[in-house]
Amino acid sequence: MNSGLSLVNLWVEGGFVIQLTAIILLVMSIASWTVMVVKAMMIYKAKQQAKQLHDFWHSPNLNNALEALESSDQDANPFKSLALEGQNAMRHHRNTEKHLHDSLDLNDWITSSLRNAIDDVKERFGSGLIVLASIGSTAPFVGLFGTVWGIYQALITISDSGMSSIDKVAGPVGEALVMTAFGLAVAIPAVLGYNALLRGNQFILNRLNRFAYDLRAFYVAGFQRSNSDKAFTE
């Protein structure tokens, strides 16, 4: 058995191209795992925040309801951000001077504002997924390129040395094939992570859409009730 069959030999004898390919795959692996960990933490936190919606709807008034949602960072809580966006849209529509959007009724205006807020959250949660998709689709080919180049260099070395026995060929070729395995080791977690994060994001977006539907009904009904009470007292 050839004692030279090792990753060290592949790194040393592969030359600049093999070394650069290995570094690229390593960087791709680090990038994909970083995205997966950061996005997984975001989804986990958002799922925990979604559980607070029960307390939101069982609060005596809107101020207490907003306090029931985690308030350390508005941008970090998509549900609180959505509730505040609806509240601001209602106040703006009610108190602002006449603008083009005033041709829309309150229902359409709040619906549009909530939809824009959901789109912002969708963009924030979806950022980074393109990195995973790109790595998952390109890493195997990067590894395959390293393998092809490694085999090419190995065959040139064997041809120059005149050694053609199987034990002399198996070592360099086997070392070169490791690059394909490295590429797959980078790509497979990226693809699995992409699919898992996509499902997690869809869960959060579904909750946001349902919450937005209830918020729209709440704000529109509250506005109409306020107007009718004012008219009655007058």
Image: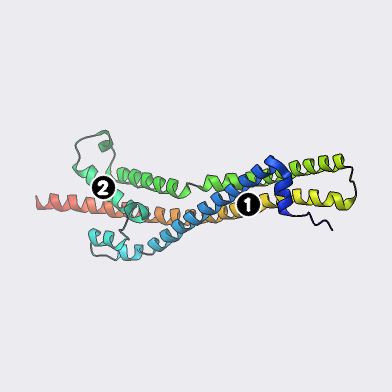
User: Horizontal and vertical percent for residue 68?
Assistant: 29, 63
For the N terminus, the image quarter is bottom right
- Say which of 185 and 176 sits in front: 176
Residue displayed at 74% across by 50% down? 9
User: Horizontal and vertical percent for residue 51?
Assistant: 39, 64
- Say which of 14 and 37 sits in front: 14
Mark 1 Cα-neighbour bin, 10 Å: few <14, some 14–19, many ≥20: many
Mark 2 belongs to which amino acid? Asn
Residue displayed at 36% across by 47% down? 117
Residue displayed at 71% across by 42% down? 15
Q: Is residue 92 left or right of residue 133?
A: left
Q: Quadrant of residue 138?
A: top right
- Say which of 6 and 43 sits in front: 6
- Say which of 71 and 117 sits in front: 71
Please give the residue where the numbered disc 1 appears in the rendered image.
186
Q: Is residue 221 visible?
A: yes
**Residue that sits furthest to the top in the current view:** 100
Residue displayed at 26% across by 53% down? 221
Q: Is residue 85 left or right of residue 145?
A: left
- The CA span between labels 1 and 2 is 45 Å
- SS for dot 1: helix
Closer to us: mark 1 or mark 2? Answer: 1
- SS for dot 2: helix
Mark 2 Cα-neighbour bin, 10 Å: few <14, some 14–19, many ≥20: some
Q: Is residue 137 visible?
A: no
Q: Are marks 1 and 2 in contact (CB under 8 Å)?
A: no
Mark 1 belongs to which amino acid? Val
The mark that comes first in sequence, 1 or 2, is 2
Please give the residue where the numbered disc 2 appears in the rendered image.
88
